[in-house]
């Protein structure tokens, strides 16, 4: 198994609800190491750029409005098989389908306000880490 880096965002709903500490505790309990972090309040344009791959989706407008609605914590995590493993720890996009004990089962309210984001593949991880941390090493 390879050491990887991946990008996660603790989204505005989870930050506003006071769950930053709870979620970081889960990252650390699952052997993810924080290698970079920034508390941001995205502009609508920044949220649109980050989620550009979803531009054609019906939820794009609402998603980017939500993501620019309040503070969010953007983090680069490192660990063995980090990209896939983080997605398992987060749980399904829709919290209604998320497994017990996952971050979204514990803290997400809806498919849009779903507490956390995680890169879904090596290519998207590279794009997303570069979007918030230009120049950061991929490994
Ligand atoms: P995330 O993992 O950040 O990737 C894209 C985001 O779009 C997703 O989490 C949700 O917040 C949102 N999303 C995905 N599907 C839907 C949907 N059907 N309706 C509303 N929001 C969605």
Image (cartoon, rainbow, N blue to C red):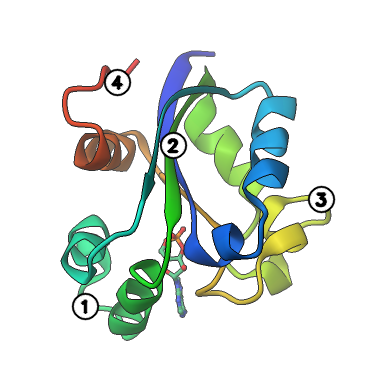
Give the mark, 2 or 3, whose residue is nearer the N terminus.
2
Give the mark, 4 or 2, whose residue is nearer the N terminus.
2
2 vs 1, front mark: 2
Q: Quadrant of ligand 1?
A: bottom left
- Residue under the point 83% across and 56% down: 100
- Residue under the point 69% across and 52% down: 103
Number of the label disc, if any, that sits on residue 56: 1
Where is the C terminus found, in terms of image quarters? top left
Number of the label disc, if any, that sits on residue 75: 2
Instruction: Give the residue number, with chain letter if any, for mark 3.
Output: 101
Where is the N terminus found, in terms of image quarters? top right
> x and y percent of residue 67 in the render?
38, 67
> x and y percent of residue 57 in the render?
29, 79
Give the mark, 2 or 1, whose residue is nearer the N terminus.
1
2 vs 3, front mark: 2
Give the mark, 4 or 3, whose residue is nearer the N terminus.
3
How far apart marks 4 and 3 lie (CA) works out to 29 Å
> x and y percent of residue 122 in the render?
34, 33
Q: Secondary structure at mark 4?
A: loop
Q: Is residue 97 above or below residue 127?
A: below
Number of the label disc, if any, that sits on residue 138: 4
Q: Secondary structure at mark 2?
A: strand
- Residue under the point 57% across and 38% down: 86
- Residue under the point 36% across and 83% down: 62
In the image: residue 44, left or right of residue 110: left
């Amino acid at each position: 198994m390879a050491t990887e880096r991946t990008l996660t965002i603790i989204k505005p709903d989870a930050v506003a609800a006071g769950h930053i500490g709870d979620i970081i505790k889960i990252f650390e309990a699952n052997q993810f190491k924080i290698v970079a972090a920034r508390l941001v309040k995205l502009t609508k344009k920044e949220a649109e750029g980050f989620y550009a791959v979803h531009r054609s989706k019906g939820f794009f407008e609402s998603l980017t409005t939500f993501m620019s609605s309040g503070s969010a914590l953007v983090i680069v995590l490192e660990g063995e098989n980090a990209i896939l493993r983080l997605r398992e720890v987060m749980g399904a996009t829709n919290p209604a389908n998320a497994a017990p004990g996952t971050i979204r089962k514990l803290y997400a309210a809806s498919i849009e306000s779903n507490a956390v984001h995680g890169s879904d593949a090596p290519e998207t991880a590279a794009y997303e880490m570069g979007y918030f941390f230009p120049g950061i090493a991929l490994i």
